[in-house]
Amino acid sequence: MSELILGIDLGTTNSMAAWVGPQGPEVVESEQITSHVPSVVSFGQRGRLVGQAALAARLEQPKHTFYSFKRFMGRGPKDISEDLSRLPFEVRSGDRDNLLLWAEDRGYSPEEMSSLILVEIKTRAEAILGQPVKKAVITVPAYFDDGQRQATRDAAELAGLEAVRILNEPTAAAIAYGLGEKQKGKVVVYDFGGGTFDVSVLELKEKIFKVLSTQGDTRLGGDDLDQLVAEQIAKEFLRGLELDPHSRQYLKKVAEEIKINLTSQTHTKTHIHLPAIGVDQELVYTREQFDQAIAPLVTRTLGHIAQALDQANLTPEEIDDVVLVGGSTRIPLVRHQVEQYFNKPPHIRLNPDQVVSLGAAIQGHLLAGGRRDFLLMDIIPLSLGIETLGGTFSKLVLKNASIPAKATEVFSTSIDNQTGIDLNLFQGEREFVKDCRNLGRFKLAGIPPMPAGLPKVEVTFFVDNNGLLTVTAEELRSHVKAQIDIVPTHGLKRAEVSRMIKESYEKALDDFSMRNLVEFRAKAEAIEAGLVKVWEQAPKYLSPAEIKAIEEHRQALLKIAQGDDPLALKAAIDQMGHLTREFADAIMGDAAKSALIKPGKG
Amino acid sequence: MAGAATHHHHHNERCQSCAAQLKHRLYCDTCEKIQQLGQGDDYFSIFGHPRTFKLDPKRIEKNFEEMMLALHPDFYANAEAQEQTLSLEHTALLNEAKNALFNPYLRGRYLLTLLVPELGTVLGQPPQTFILETFALQEALDEAEKGRRDIGPLSKQISKLSTEIEEALEQQFGKLTEYGDQPELVEAIRAGLSKLKFLINLRDRARSIEKSLS
């Protein structure tokens, strides 16, 4: 059997894992536990909470409950167009061009936050599958740049996972679709998720799935739709009342509920209860109002489709099928607009929430050597290059180039006896570097002194199959190789990743996280199983009152074990220990005696 | 289905590991070993394509896909480091080579440096007469951009000019291969390539005008 490589969809609002089991690709879940985890982390009096429990704490702990941090991965203060002060939690600029999410006493990098989600998924998957998980294929929006991809890989490393492959989300969906539906032809994947939007155009052949073009917006998702609805409610219904963090969070939650209700209903009634600002009213919201609120963003996604088709040299009529991915594609207006654009109903047989993780699992299966029945040929979403004279952007690898890709270009010095060259790396489509994303800089040092213009510095860009860039440089006359030390502009330095890994091991001991919960659940299950076995003997050893107390607590324990609170579960287990100690001792004593009486058996 | 005729340019190349005759330059289908690149390898040879300006796109595409299916790094995730590196480098090369070969200007420039290595890659501007000839075409594009002229016929005219130059280059490259380095021939090819580059730019501009109008 091949090694297990999990497929993980690390989403803005929700994350989950899938694997290829004996039944084929499936989401990792059992009757008790699921790997489907809201991408939310909360720091409160009860310690650190991750996933569903953190999501539940969002209203009580608005300042210390962090969500949508995927949007800050590999980004700096200047990249964030949204008003950070509107967020219920605090985001501060770090000492470089990075962002930190501030909880009580310290700042957490978006990588650390994401790693907590990954640890949660890893732990759950291990409990469900009953085997250790060390490797994963992790998906990212196709439009993620190099910095955002590196940050994702760092998050995996912090979580003790090797990201054997960073896979584009729409491409992952196309794998699941191509293999599951045995389709061929030109396919558009329209991926409208919680925080990002991607559209990819693919050509599916016999065994080759080739990405032709990709286009997207890493700051456009269901979150933004909720925000628009919340703003509309605040403006029209609350008439511009001053909102505190709690109210803002509350309204956002209301907006999300309205959005979900309106996928199946044409209007919805919500009770808005905000005592802090004196609001306690019914709100009727129609689908028409909703469509009106979100229309600008839906139209924006159509613009991206047009660009992607243009880059692939195709027209809407030439597309054989449109695959919808991401929770936001459940919105009737979105489906309607996409259908109108292509003049054909989109493909909706695949579950839009699961298809990305399933595709990632299939790719993981291939990487592990478990199959060889398809090949994915992907592309780079944004051009890569360096800054040249006058702040112009000199592209070396062009957008939509097939990866792995390699490009070289020769540069020279501008001053006599110059012994070093600073290279500033950028990614984007604009003419000037000021309009592109700065990835980092590196220095080619040790060039022998020569007159200006004489050295020939060959710079090589190599983009691997993950879309990750490495840069090397060599002075061709002296064969001096670059002493390369890329300092990422927004992400973590290697030393920081190592330090964080060390710290997380030290902290793990007193950390009541999911890890404990899974263990406690197993313990609770073992206690229950043990009790079932011996319970008929209880009247022999226990008073009716004792029996009643234990019976009651059994029910309570089972219920708490279904929940997500490790501390409560621990307390319930301890309580059960107290209640049953004497009973257990008595039974053990008798069992030992009977073992002495019947030594031949067993 | 690949008959012997498809591969007669291979000069009976043999696998560096098991000595079986190679069907693909970069990969041995017999022992499944990745092949190292050699001295005589170029964008053409790795696809088993002759060094000619005239292109057989089907052969390139077929060889490209077959080698990708054998060499892609996703199939070497558990392989030894050296194999992984070769897989990455070879697939990057295949992408780079295919891109260059499918672009007539890049293909011509590459072939010229292969045949006349001492020439360098700098081509310079197209001849003045050509720029004057195409001046009217550029003005017409300006007009079309403002919506005062139909873009369709202009695009056709640009394509026709490109095809003519490509056909001339095919013949000139043929002669260069057959009779060797002749200064006049080399000059004619250089001029032809610089014209082609110019026309490709015009074609791209025509295309973007066409799109902005639709």
Image: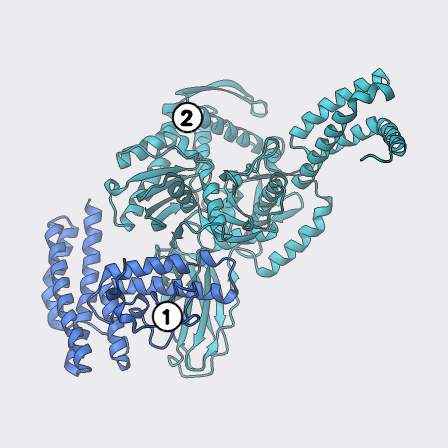
In this view, the residue in front, B30 or B136, is: B30
Q: In the rendered image of this protein, does residue A346 appear above or below residue A442?
A: above
Q: Which residue is mark 2?
A: A263
Say which residue appears at 47% left-offset and 41% top-offset.
A358
Residue A93 visible, this orientation = no
* Callout 2: chain: A
Q: Residues within 10 Å of mark 2 (few under 14, many from 20)?
A: some
Residue A382 visible, this orientation = yes
In this view, the residue in front, B200 or A129, is: A129
Residue B214 appears left or right of A144: left
Residue A589 appears left or right of A501: right
CB within 8 Å, label 1 to label 2: no
Chain A appears what colour? cyan
Q: Earlier in the sequence, mark 1 or mark 2?
A: 2
Say which residue appears at 52% left-offset and 54% top-offset.
A164
* Callout 1: chain: A
The numbered mark at residue A409 is 1
Considering the numbered disc 1 on the image, is that residue within a helix, a strand or a loop? strand
Badge 1 amino acid: Glu
Residue B175: which quarter of the image? bottom left
Considering the numbered disc 2 on the image, is that residue within a helix, a strand or a loop? loop
Badge 2 amino acid: Thr
Q: Which chain is blue?
A: B
Image quarter hosting the C terminus of chain A: top right
